[in-house]
């Protein structure tokens, strides 16, 4: 997840992780993923604490703005995110 991020700010890195999380969940929809599965899909293989923390923040922030549903077991894109993705992909 941290390819060539040398000059990026924390805010830009957070946005990049949010984008990757949302893109992955939209690509795999209607499959629902656990948080651990999401980490593996993003290439973290369980990942370091920093990687897990970044994904947790992304899930929290995306859920806060209504783009994700975060249940106790699964994470999935919200209907608004799915519709936006449909419109963008036209």
Image (spheres, grey):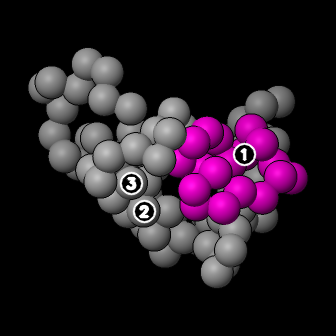
Residue named by callout 1: 26
Which badge, 2 or 1, is on the more N-terminal residue? Answer: 1
**Of residues 33 and 67, the one drawn nearer to the viewer in this rendering:** 33
Q: Nearer the viewer, mark 2 or mark 1?
A: 2
- Residue 37, position as x, y percentages in the image: 64, 51
Principal secondary structure, stretch drawn in magenta: helix
In the drawing, does residue 39 fall left or right of residue 24? Answer: left
Q: Residues within 10 Å of mark 1 (few under 14, many from 20)?
A: many
Q: Residues within 10 Å of mark 2 (few under 14, many from 20)?
A: some
- Residue 40, position as x, y percentages in the image: 57, 42
Q: Find numbered disc 3 in the image and state the secondary structure of the residue it sits on.
A: helix
In the drawing, does residue 13 fall left or right of residue 26? Answer: left
Q: Using the numbered discs, state the Cα–Cα distance from disc 3 to disc 2 in whole angstroms.
A: 6 Å
Residue 67 position by quadrant: bottom right
Residue named by callout 3: 52
Q: Nearer the viewer, mark 3 or mark 1?
A: 3
Span highlighted in magenta in the image = 19-41
Which badge, 3 or 1, is on the more N-terminal residue? Answer: 1
* The label number, if any, that marks residue 56 in the structure image: 2
């Amino acid at each position: 997840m941290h390819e060539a991020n040398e000059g990026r700010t924390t805010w830009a890195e957070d946005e990049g992780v949010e984008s990757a999380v949302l893109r992955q969940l939209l690509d795999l929809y209607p499959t629902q993923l656990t948080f651990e599965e999401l980490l593996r899909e993003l290439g973290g293989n369980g990942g370091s604490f920093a990687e897990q923390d970044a994904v947790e923040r992304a899930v929290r922030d995306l859920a806060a703005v209504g783009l994700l549903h975060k249940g106790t077991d699964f994470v999935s894109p919200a209907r608004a995110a799915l519709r936006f993705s449909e419109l963008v992909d036209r």
